[in-house]
Amino acid sequence: MKPTLILACGNTLRGDDGVAWHIGSALQNMPQDELTAAGVEVILTPQLLPEHAEPLSSANTAVFLDCSAIDQPGIVSTRALQPAQSLPCIFTHHLDPASLLKLTLELYGRIPLRSAAITVGGNCFELQEQLSEPVRAAIPIAIQAVRSAVFASHAC
Amino acid sequence: MSQTITIDPVTRLEGHGKITIHLNEAGDVEAAHFHVTQVRGFEKFAEGRPFYEMPSLMARICGICPVSHLIASAKACEAIMSVRIPHAAAQLRRMLNLAQMVQSHALSFFYLASPDLLLGMESDPKTRNIFGVAAAAPEMGRAGVALRRFGQSMIEVLANKRIHPGWVVPGGVTEPLSSAKRDQILAMIPEAYANVSLALGAYKKVADQFKTEIEVFANFPSNYMSLINEDESIEFTDGDLRLIEAGGKTIEDGMTASRFIEVIGEAVEPYSYTKFPYYKPLGYPAGSYRVGPLARLNIVQHMGTPKADKELAEFKQLAAGPVASSFHYHHARLIEMLYGVEKIEQILADPKILDKHVRATAGVNRLEGAGQAEAPRGVLHHHYNVDENGKITRVNLVIATGQNNKAMNDGVFQVARHYVKDGKFTEGILNRVEAVVRAFDPCLSCSTHAYGRMPLSIELLAPDGTTLDKLRAG
């Protein structure tokens, strides 16, 4: 397991909802640099799942990448994450990062030392594979945010 | 005054539906229905597509059991091409289907059913879920995660993608297995054995606590249907179908995919978008039957692998003939997982699995073709007609969940009638009404081939149709 796990979550068939996959793919294909040398594993996933608890339990840093339907289009936000205090009483097809961290703690007794959610505000969620312009333009900013989150954790 | 209870949506299922329970004037259950409320569409929009696109298109019906759709669809295409696929290709597909069965059964048992089984039907609904299991029995949660990983990783190793792989094609598979990939899969086997054994042990410890549920969870005589090998062992990918009656006697044997079309009809009920398949010679509803793990284990004489055979012998002690209670689907599912791991190990031990010849080619040689395979939930049937250019002119899909539809409805009625008295019910009672459906592990997206949200709901209705109570979740 790599020290940093990036869970890029979204649906590439729903326009901007797929932005995390674009960011995650860019990170996977990035030439060797200080970020990739630091040991990063990227998982591209349509949704968070209980089985993501396993790789999370052995990572030192976790970054959850997703699109935000609330933020302004193209706005990149970073926030620190803690495990949920209580868990949702229903699990069918939705799991949020804080609940997944809590599940990881319950199952494996360990979570990453530092977890962050990095979101990009979305604009268009129609059936299309293209990103809207402000969201596409935010990808380099989001990658920089990932870099900051990873190295901030290394500095701790 | 009579009443109706609605459970909407029914939770911890693959799909979106609801349950209504109708009470009479005395407050007793008069009728109960399991409604599948999604709309089907795949059969229609595939028309006009080239037949060789069908496996990839049909796999999109489901994110849980796409492999079964891939295989049944490819087999229907191969009937159109009139080709027999190479042995290695057939074995590779068999392994892929087993890997999917293991991950799907793991989802059903650990994520959806184990909260009821390990925490209790009456336990606090706020914690009666995978999170509650993780807190109360983390080793079981870890086993579920690991078995899901085993199946999904194996699908990825074989077919290069976890969901909707394009590796299975009409004529075989696109790429042979390398020795490196074989060794990668073999390295995962010991952990998978350990996790299935853990689950079997845990299930057997708690099963006796559910005597009443075993008694009333869709526990009635019915017909059963599944694929079976000529040597009477279990089969998921090839072989022909056998239909048996409640006492275990064979009604029809050696049912090929083309014979299935002739003898299986699809009835329609006004309360569900999912059809009700039945064996035409017996008519509807007498010709209804159950499919899936319980049916498979009731039909076969042996599993064909030593560890699973030992478990099957124990399972068959549950009844003098076919095991009738649908509660035992859970037990059957665990035995099938054990079989899956063993069979994969057996197949990989044969050096022929690395054969490079894995695809046969041909054009359109027939204007009609049908294919069948066992999905985790039961036999899955694809039937296509094409024109001379190979364009699809008609599609009919008979899905495992549909074939269990009658039994699920009768099961909901049986459970509701047993537990709901004088119009009184509790959350734990309604959970049992949902749990009987969960035992079948229905995949409602498959059964309606729909696009949409997934959750399910329960309604309690008065004789005049007034809604007295409603549970909705998801």
Image: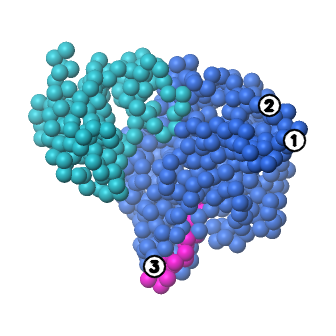
Chain colours: A cyan, B blue
- Residue B390 disc label: 3
Residue pictured at 29% horizontal, 56% vertical: A129
Return the x and y of residue B4 as percentages of the image width and height.
75, 43
Q: Separation of disc 3 and disc 1 at Cα?
A: 58 Å
Q: Chain of mark 1?
A: B
Of the numbered discs 3 and 2, the one sitting upstream in the chain is 3
Residue pictured at 40% horizontal, 32% vertical: A96
Are labels 3 and 2 assigned to the same chain?
A: yes
- Residue B443 disc label: none
Q: Which is closer to the viewer, label 3 or label 1?
A: 1
Furthest toward the top, the residue is: A156
Q: Nearer the viewer, residue B368 or B420?
A: B420
| Secondary element at image label 1 | loop
Q: Is residue A50 left or right of residue B320?
A: left
Q: Which is closer to the viewer, label 3 or label 2?
A: 2
Quadrant location of the C terminus of chain B in the rendered image: top right
Span of residues in magenta: B379-395
Furthest toward the right, the residue is: B26
Q: Residues within 10 Å of mark 2 (few under 14, many from 20)?
A: few
| Secondary element at image label 3 | loop
* Majority SS type along the magenta span: strand
Return the x and y of residue B300 as percentages of the image width and height.
71, 49
Residue B7 among magenta residues? no
Q: Separation of disc 1 and disc 2 at Cα?
A: 13 Å
Q: Nearer the viewer, residue B262 or B364?
A: B262
According to the picture, the residue beneath numbered tag 1 turns out to be B25
